[in-house]
Structure formats: C-alpha cells, structure tokens
C-alpha cells in the first residue's frame, strides 16, 4: 500500500497563527509540513489547508504560507473538515483516494478529520512529525487511535520517496538537489 503522487492530496489542518504558540513541537511540525508541501508542489500533488474559525484563531501561519506554492484553503466550523459539504464535494470531485494528513491539534481537528476521511473510504496517511498538540502525549494518542482505525503512520521522507518512486528521472534529481540532500543531516522529532 504505497503512496502514489497521482492519487494523493496533502491536507494540512489548522496550522493557525493564534494556535501555534501553545503547540508543543509546533515549529517542527510547520517545518516538516512545509518541506513536504514543497515536494508536493513540484509533483503536482494538491496541497489543501484548513482553518478552524479563523476570526478567533487567525489564518494559517505566515511562516508556512511563505513556503507554499499552489494551495487551496478551506474554512471550517466543525472540528472535522469532512463535515463541511464544500470540502467533501471538492475532494470527491478530485478523484484522489490517498490523503496525507498533518496539523494541529492532533488529538482534535486532525484526528476527527482523519476519522471522517476513513469513514468516507479514503486511505489516510498520518504524517507523524507534522501532527502536534499542546501536550505531546495527546498527539501520540491521536496517532495511535487514527492508526487503530485504519490510518497509516508515515514520515515526510517516506511520503517523498514513495511519491518519487524512482531515482533515475530528472524530477528526482531536481527534488534531490533542492529538498532531499539538504535534509539528510537534519534530526526530526516524532510525536
């Protein structure tokens, strides 16, 4: 059950400016999400963002937005984005069945969105180092619960290399030079 760039969507849930200052590991989560979004843009994998009640929590953090190429934003009032009809209709129309999900808070909006996607028949891939909560224990429990219900825990590297599929293409060489090689020496914290 490998990821396929032609079947994937990268869904970044509620990386909002008003919420991130209290998120344990929030900066790391943004860095990982932004890194993978850069690769997604190169591979034409849709990047979708959600914002929970932005009038109170602010919009998507500017540090993340500055790293993104093409993306679409969905505002929501439900904790699960799958309860928003415009989102579910657009996702169905897109025809892609694999959703790589990350964001904050892992145990609330990310988890409820993941469970809703699973209920709707999508294959959900939990981007572990980019799903964070105020308390790391809650992020860990959210990942465990999502995976117990059918999601698959993945790292950004796993996703990138599965999307790339092979190493003898011009696309791989470009992404290797700009994304993979500079990352090789970095250390990542998983929650």
Image (cartoon, helix red, strand yellow):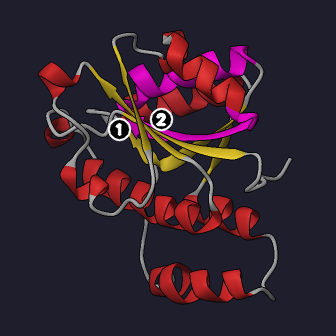
Is 69 located above or below residue 166 in the figure? above
In this orientation, which residue lies closer to the viewer: 180 or 69?
69
Q: Is residue 189 visible?
A: no
Is 129 located above or below residue 55 in the figure? below
Residue at the far right in the pictured view = 1
**Does the magenta run of residues contain 119?**
yes
Q: Which residues are magenta?
A: 94-120
In this orientation, which residue lies closer to the viewer: 37 or 180?
37
Q: Secondary structure at mark 2?
A: helix
Q: Determine which residue is flagged by label 2.
A: 140
Kindly indicate the quadrant of the structure image that contains residue 115. Answer: top right
Residue at image location 22% in from the left, 57% down from the top: 63
Kindly indicate the quadrant of the structure image that contains residue 164. Answer: bottom right
Q: Is residue 41 visible?
A: yes
In this orientation, which residue lies closer to the viewer: 150 or 35?
35
Residue at image location 64% in from the left, 22% down from the top: 117
Residue at image location 42% in from the left, 72% down from the top: 187
Residue at image location 41% in from the left, 22% down from the top: 109
Q: Tell me if 121 is positioned left or right of 130 in this view.
A: right
Q: Tell me if 28 is positioned left or right of 178 in this view.
A: left
Quadrant (top left, top right, bottom left, bottom right) of the C terminus: top left
Q: Position of residue 181 (x, y in %)?
A: 53, 87
**Does the magenta run of residues contain 2?**
no
Q: Position of residue 166 (x, y in %)?
A: 81, 77
Q: Position of residue 56 (x, y in %)?
A: 13, 20
Kindly indicate the quadrant of the structure image that contains residue 101. Answer: top right
Q: Determine which residue is flagged by label 1.
A: 136
Q: Position of residue 72 (x, y in %)?
A: 44, 40
């Amino acid at each position: 059950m490998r990821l396929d760039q032609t079947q994937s969507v990268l869904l970044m849930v509620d990386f909002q400016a008003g919420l991130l200052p209290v998120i344990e590991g929030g900066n790391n989560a943004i860095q990982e999400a932004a890194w993978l979004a850069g690769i997604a843009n190169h591979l034409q994998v849709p990047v979708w963002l959600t914002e929970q009640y932005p009038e109170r929590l602010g919009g998507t953090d500017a540090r993340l937005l500055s790293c993104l190429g093409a993306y679409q934003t969905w505002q929501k009032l439900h904790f699960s984005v799958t309860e928003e009809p415009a989102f579910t209709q657009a996702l169905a129309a897109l025809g892609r069945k694999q959703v790589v999900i990350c964001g904050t808070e892992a145990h609330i909006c990310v988890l409820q969105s993941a469970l809703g996607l699973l209920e709707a028949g999508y294959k959900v891939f939990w981007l572990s180092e980019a799903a964070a909560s105020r308390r790391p224990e809650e992020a860990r429990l959210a990942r465990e619960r999502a995976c117990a219900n059918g999601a698959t825990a993945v790292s950004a590297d796993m996703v990138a290399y599965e999307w790339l599929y092979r190493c003898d293409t011009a696309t791989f060489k470009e992404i290797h030079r700009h994304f993979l090689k500079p990352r090789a020496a970095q250390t990542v914290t998983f929650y």
